[in-house]
Image: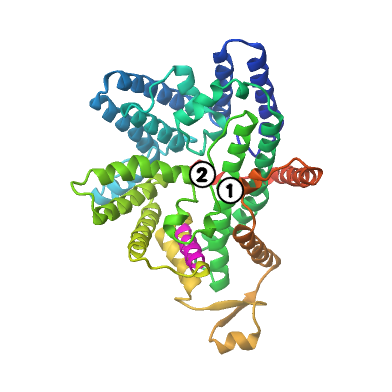
Amino acid sequence: MLFSSYIFILIFLPIVLLGYFFITKYVENTNTAKVFLILASLFFYGYWYPPYLLIILSSIVVNYFLSKKIVQTKSKNLFYFGLVFNIGLLGYFKYRDFFLDNLNYLINTDIGFAKLALPLGISFFTLQQIAFIVDSYQGITKENRFCDYALFVCFFPQLIAGPIVHYKDLIPQFAKEDNKKFNFSNFNLGIFIFVVGLFKKVIIADTFSGWANEGFDHTTVHHFISAWATSLSYTMQLYFDFSGYSDMAIGLGSMFNIKIPRNFNSPFLARNIIDFWTRWHITLSQFITTYIFTPLFRSFKKLTFRNSLISVFITMLIAGIWHGAGYTFIVYGFMYGSALVVNHLLKKRKIKLPKWLAIFLTFNFTNIVFTMFRAHSISDALSIYKGMFGLTFLKLPKGIFSKDFILSIGAEIGPYMNNDQNLNLILLIICLIMVMKAKNSGEMAKNFKPTLKTSFILSMMFVLSLFGINRVSDFIYFNF
C-alpha cells in the first residue's frame, strides 16, 4: 500500500487513527493498542503481496528469540548467527540472481535464475533488526517483549523505506501516558508534514520521473543540454521522492504522537561530501557509522588516520552494494568512498574553498554520482557523461542561444526543443532555487502555526496532490 494512494489516505489511515485512539482511551490493557497497530501494519505490508508476510513474520520471530537468548547468555556464537541470518536473508533475495549471472559468465554454466521479486522494505526492516541484535549483544537494549519488538519492526509509517529507527528511541514513546491521548497540536503538525511530503512526491518527483526515465532509457541520443537535463531530473526526482516519503513517515508518526527521526536536512547546501552525508539519508549514515565503520576501524591493530581512511572507503563500498545488485552500485560506492577519502585529506590539511564554490562542486559531484546510481549499466552512465562534458561532440538545441554564438564556439546546431523539454528546464531551474534557498520541511515544521493562510496553502497542495495520484509511481527506495 502506498502512502500516496486513495485507499491509504481516505480509508486505511482514518480507520487506524480512530481505532488506535479509541483503544488507548477505553481499553485498559496497554498491549491491545500495540497489537492493533501491529495487525494494521501487517495488513499495510501484506496488501501489496500477501505471501511476503511470511518473510517479515519469520524474520521477526527468529530475531526476537535470538535477541532474547543473546541478552541472557551474551553468546558470541548466537550473535554471529544472528548477523549471518539477517545478512543471508537479505543477500538471498537481493543478490542471488546477480551472483548466479556472474557465476554463469565466469565458469560458462547455465544455472537458472530464481527471478525473485524483492520483498518490500526488506533492506530497512533487516537493518533495524541487525542494529537490535548488536545492541542486545552490547547490553544497550535489554527489554524485548514480543509485542514491543514486533511493533518496533513493523510500525507502518517507517516500515517500507525508513527512516531507520532504534528500539530504545521508538518503543518507550508508546508507553508515555500523554502519547496515548489524541493531541490536536501533534495531529495538525503531522497533517502539515504529511501533505508537504505528499506534494513533493506526487507533484514534483513524479513529474521529474517521466523526464528521467525517458533520458536514461535512450542514452545514445543526448546532446549537452539533454544530458544535463536527464541527470539533474533524476537527482531532483530522487531527492523529492525520498525526502517526500520521509516527510510523510514523520508526519504519520506525529499523528500518533510518535517522533520519527529526521532523514534529510537541505543536503544540496552541503559544502563537502562529509557534510553531505550528515544531511542526506541521515539515519542510514548514522547506521553505517555505528555498525559498519566503527567496528571495521576498531578491527585494526593501530587506530591511525590511514586506517580510518581505509575503513571509510570500505564502508562506502558496502553501502553502495547494499543499495542494489549491480556494478553501477559498486561504482557508486567507489565514487563516494574515494570522494570521502579526498575530503578527509583536504580537511586534515585545512584546505577550504569559498562557500559558494564548495556548494557548487559538492552538488555537481553528487549529481554525477547519482547518474551512475540511476543508470541501467556503466556504459549507459558513461554515455550520459559524454553528453554532459562534450567528450564526443557539443550539440546545443536551437532556442537556447543564437545561431551565431553556437557556430562561434564550434558546436553543432541541434533540433528545436519541444514544449516538454522547455518545461523540464523551467521546472529544473525552479527546483534548484527551491533546494538552495527555501526552508526545508524540518525548518518549516519548527515554525508551523495552523493559521488561515497556512490552511489555505496546505489545502491547495493536498487537492493538487489528490488529482496527481492517478499517475503516481512507486517510491524509489522501495527498490532498495
Q: Amino acid at mark 1?
A: Asp
Quarter of the figure with the N terminus = top right
Front-most of residues 348 and 83:
348
Q: Residue at x 74, y 43 (%)?
A: 462
Measuring from the top left, give residue 92's x and y in whole percent: 36, 36
Q: Nearer the viewer, residue 373 or 76?
A: 76
Q: To which residue does mark 2 refer?
A: 477
Q: Which residue is mark 1?
A: 241
Query: What residue is rendered at 29% in x and 47% in y?
Result: 104
Q: Is residue 266 shown to the viewer in this render?
A: yes
Segment colored magenta: 358-370
Label 1 crowd (10 A; few <14 / some 14-19 / many >=20): many
Q: Residue at x 60, y 42 (%)?
A: 247
Asked if the residues shown at circle 1 and circle 2 are in contact, with their CB atoms under 8 angstroms apart, the answer is yes
- In the image, is 463 to the left or to the right of 286? right
Q: Earlier in the sequence, mark 1 or mark 2?
A: 1
What's the amino acid at mark 2? Tyr
Indicate whether 159 appears above or below 409.
Answer: above
Instruction: Tell me if mark 2 has few (under 14), some (14-19) or many (20+) residues whose alpha carbon lies within 10 angstroms of its own.
Output: some
Q: Position of residue 475 (x, y in %)?
A: 56, 44
Whether 133 is among the magenta residues is: no
Q: Position of residue 139 (x, y in %)?
A: 33, 26
Residue extending farthest top: 28
Inter-mark Cα distance, 1 to 2: 9 Å
